[in-house]
Amino acid sequence: MSQFILQNFNVVVVVSLLTVFLVIALRPLAIKASFMDTPTTRKIHEGEIPLTGGISIFFATCLTSVIFYESLPPDSMTLLACAGLSLLLGAIDDKFDLHASTKLTLQIAIVSIFIMSTGHIVTSLGSPIGFSGPVELGMLSIPFTVLAIVGLQNTFNMVDGCDGLAASLVLVSLLALIFVAPEVLSELSRKILLVLSSSILLFLFFNFSNSKGLKAFLGDGGSLSLGFIVAASFVEFSASNTLYDPSLVLWFAAIPIMDFCTVIVRRTLLKRKIMAADRSHLHHLLLSLGLSHLQITVLTSLAAVALLVFGLFVTSNHPNISFWFFVVLFLVYLSIRMFTVKGE
């Protein structure tokens, strides 16, 4: 782990400097274009905050990757291009508040372009206990992959309601992809994810800043593009992985997945619009308990890491029950949240 970082230390430094430069340089442009997040009854931050974090992270990552990895293979170029389209979609949504169905349709189109261009799809769900062999998806592989990527995109998008939370949970997932099974992803894929992780780490400084002149938000563009990269990398990991059960990737993003699914179930049972924003997420509950944004992000990130370590242990030693263990934990969490009324 440390050796990999040291070997790419110059890359980490460059992307960090670019991130700092872009966040600062884009601020006056965001103010001039009114590309700001304004407080509402659901958004409790003070003052208008530039939505330039995701843009800064994306362009810092792309520029650094192009500078240091001149001959990016087609799959990497497609990954960054589709992430860019997701960024654009989210930025337009930030500015004009797109209808949920329009946004979802465009997400599906972008993901479809990625799948057709790279051929990366999930073909198997592994061999969970209760099945005689691997559960092959066959003709369902493409629709399942589209659903998985779009779903995970929205998972990170919907959890972005607290300073540093979405970025930190994305960071946990990226670091898991880079270091948990380094043999699975290609060396170049791991390097690009390291570049992205370094940029996110620098962005967190601005996201947590109490200075009105420095603070910046990811924006929908940031959460959608980062969610896309994480989800697409999960697919590549699953397609290339021969060491672990495919269910391992669930543990890479356990907290956001469980929270997302719980919110969807609750909204469905309460006959609310599934994609309509409300205050039913885990971070809203923790806010209602009096925790600060920093406390919530640290606590949730530590829980995400703990679940990751636990999931890795279960998958390594009892691969046939890894998926069902995840399901059981989710049902326990769902049961608790179904009887939770605070913050909702």
Image (cartoon, rainbow, N blue to C red):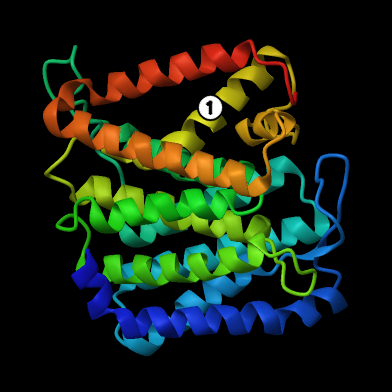
Percent position of residue 154, x then y: 57, 43
Quadrant position of residue 302: top left
Q: Is residue 39 left or right of residue 70?
A: right
Q: Quadrant of the C terminus?
A: top right
The residue positioned 46% from the left and 78% from the top of the image is: 62
The residue positioned 67% from the left and 37% from the top of the image is: 291
| Mark 1, other Cα within 10 Å: few <14 / some 14–19 / many ≥20 | some
Residue type, mark 1 in image: Cys
The residue positioned 25% from the left and 56% from the top of the image is: 179
Quadrant position of residue 254: top left
Number of numbered discs: 1
Residue 247 visible to an observer of this rendering: no
Q: Quadrant of the N terminus?
A: bottom left
The residue positioned 28% from the left and 59% from the top of the image is: 178
Q: Which residue is mark 1?
A: 261
Q: Is residue 216 above or below residue 127?
A: below
Q: Is residue 58 left or right of residue 36?
A: left
Q: Is residue 202 above or below residue 318?
A: below
